[in-house]
Image (cartoon, rainbow, N blue to C red):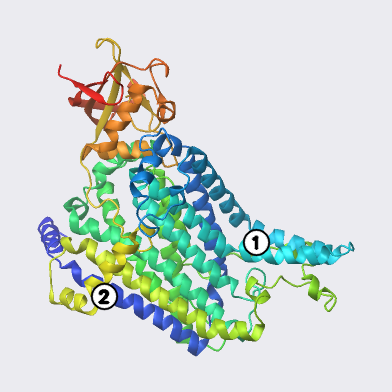
Amino acid sequence: MSVGNNVFFLNRLQTVDWSHLHPVVLALAYTGVLSSVGSHLLFGNAEQYLCSALLFQRLSAVVLLLAFASFWVQCIGCVGENGIEPLADKVSRMRKQGWVAFPTIFRRWPTNQALHIVHAIGCGIALVLLFDLHHLLQQALFYLAATTSIPFLPTALALFARLLSLLCSSPVLFAACYLLYLSVRCVAGVFMCLQFDNLILETAALAACVSFATSLLPSAHYDSSFSSSSFSALLAVELAMWAVWWLNFRILYSSGLVKIVCDRRWRDGSAMLFHYWSQPIPNPGSYFAHWYVPAWLHRLSAWIHLVIELLLPWVMFLPAAAATASSSPSSSFFASLCGSLRLWAVLIMVAFQVAISCTGNYGFFNANAAILTVALLSDANIPVWLCDLLRFDLSHWGLSVIPVSTASSSSSSASVPPLSRWVISDEVFSALSRYLVVPLMLAVLLFLLFMTTHSLWITHQRYVSPSWLSQLYEKLFPKDLYETIYYNFHRFSLWSSYGLFRTMTTNRTELVIEGSNDLTEWRVYEFKYKPTSLTRRPPVAFPHLPRLDWMLWFCQFRSPSWLEWFLYELLRGNRDVCGLLSHVPFPLDKPPTFLRVYRYEYRFSPTSTATGEWWSRSNQTRFCPILKLSKDGKSLVHLRI
């Protein structure tokens, strides 16, 4: 293709009315869900996502563990009692609002101890879910109840095991993780305002839905064969998985859409020429990708980036059903083709997240996005050994795990019934599963589709031109209804909008903070991950997400109010806040008298191996006047020098 044709193509691309895609996506999503229900009603091939659902739960526990642990090590300095934005101040301002407007458990206990306890509980629950410890403990109690001969002890152990299965089941534990993270997020303010946190909350909520659906199965964790009585429960599993797939679609499609609409650098392929050194926290892979990858490959990678985000997510609408012996040759070929396309798309999207993680520090986000992509796999694509590991229980060691009430009437080993079977009979359970649970999950899924798609529509509407199709969309889905629901419940982050790297920054402005006691000798404060020293190699932070360093990157676009409080705490020698830095050049009991902040333009240095400098900087400008504490030590004073 000639240069003239390329220019013509790019100009045409900029005039495309992308608003047409939103109603199309919504229609396809609803069609996919309803066709999934219809295919099961007609053919009943619903068993193909059970291992995928179990795998999604375990991997979600991994991401939740990373998220809780990452913020735990920095929460005291960020939002502790003496942090940059103390949670007690926010609680005092928001306490009069209801639980819906301010859903946090810290409204009654805004202390450092509460922060530690919440994060410890969150990490503990994630570990329990990861290794399925609650279910193994339940089985161990049943084994002890069936083998002990001490009077009254078998009954007590069996009752305790059943109580444990009700209060500590996977849906309850995932819901607890969601509520704990939501509580922290509500008081964390600017330090948890990233899209990464919205994604964590949505993932935890969907994991609770998926685990609830799998708990409806008679032997969901251990048996690969299912009777027709579990048909409704299997359908509930796939409906819950559809919600997971839809979240994966929204992240990638929305991110690709805002790139191609909002920034010409993504369209002409020049975005990656700036990305590696201008991103919030580069790593060593960023440096080598910037200098050792040719320019033409940078441009090609930008277009590949758009193709992956805009085209590959559509594979969620492809069927993943395996061909059967009675299938015709044409249907077998179609099933095989769709399965192969789906598998290769998943592999490419996972490799895409791995590549991003290798060339930038984005904390646990890439792992979270990859988990949502892996959920697209059907059971046929998951290794048998992994499926066996997901269904592992004590019966694999030859231990009987039969409840004590049935141990006398059966001599063979069997799996523990799910929690719902101890509350109602099998007949009532089957009827509720078929006529209540599945329709309820379908209604919830359709509601989430409406809210999330409308959220995406409202968010990006200012980037697209109006059309008759957008007007029809607004008539079919009233804006007032959406806004009423959204603004009353947006704190719960169940229908967030996404759009990563909407515009590519073409410069890197870093703030360098220096302290002095005599206005002559100035010493530099060093951060753990943000570049300050020119000779410091870009760090590897994965899977940690350093909140302060990330937020300081956004200071090049605006001067936030919390930055002044951060400088104030440095002048006070606040131990908690200074703990967020890698080097404080003054003793904490003798902090500096003055602070100054300069702004520099940073770039990767092309000669790091020869000079030892990974960065070069220029254009020194003053960010703010020299600061010192007031006489009463309660505010900052600007020196006019």
Residue shown at 22%/51% (left/top)?
269
Q: Nearer the viewer, residue 599 or 311?
A: 599
Q: Position of residue 612 (x, y in %)?
A: 35, 22
Residue under pointer 1: 389
513 over 212 or under it: above or below = above
390 over 364 or under it: above or below = below
Query: Residue 229 lies in what quarter of the image?
Result: bottom right
Residue shown at 17%/76% (left/top)?
469
Residue under pointer 2: 24
The amino acid marked with disc number 2 is: Val
The amino acid marked with disc number 1 is: Leu
Residue shown at 24%/66% (left/top)?
457
Residue shown at 40%/37% (left/top)?
78
Q: Hey, which residue is sitting farthest front in the picture?
A: 96
Instruction: Determine whether the residue tagged by mark 2 lies in a helix, strand or loop.
Output: helix
Tags 2 and 1 touching, CB below 8 Å: no
Q: Nearer the viewer, residue 157 or 535?
A: 157
Q: Is residue 503 left or right of residue 165?
A: left
Label 2 to label 1: alpha-carbon separation:
40 Å
275 over 395 or under it: above or below = above
Among the two numbered marks 2 and 1 on one chain, the one whose residue lies closer to the N terminus: 2
Q: Position of residue 231 (x, y in %)?
A: 56, 83
Q: Is residue 402 left or right of residue 308?
A: right
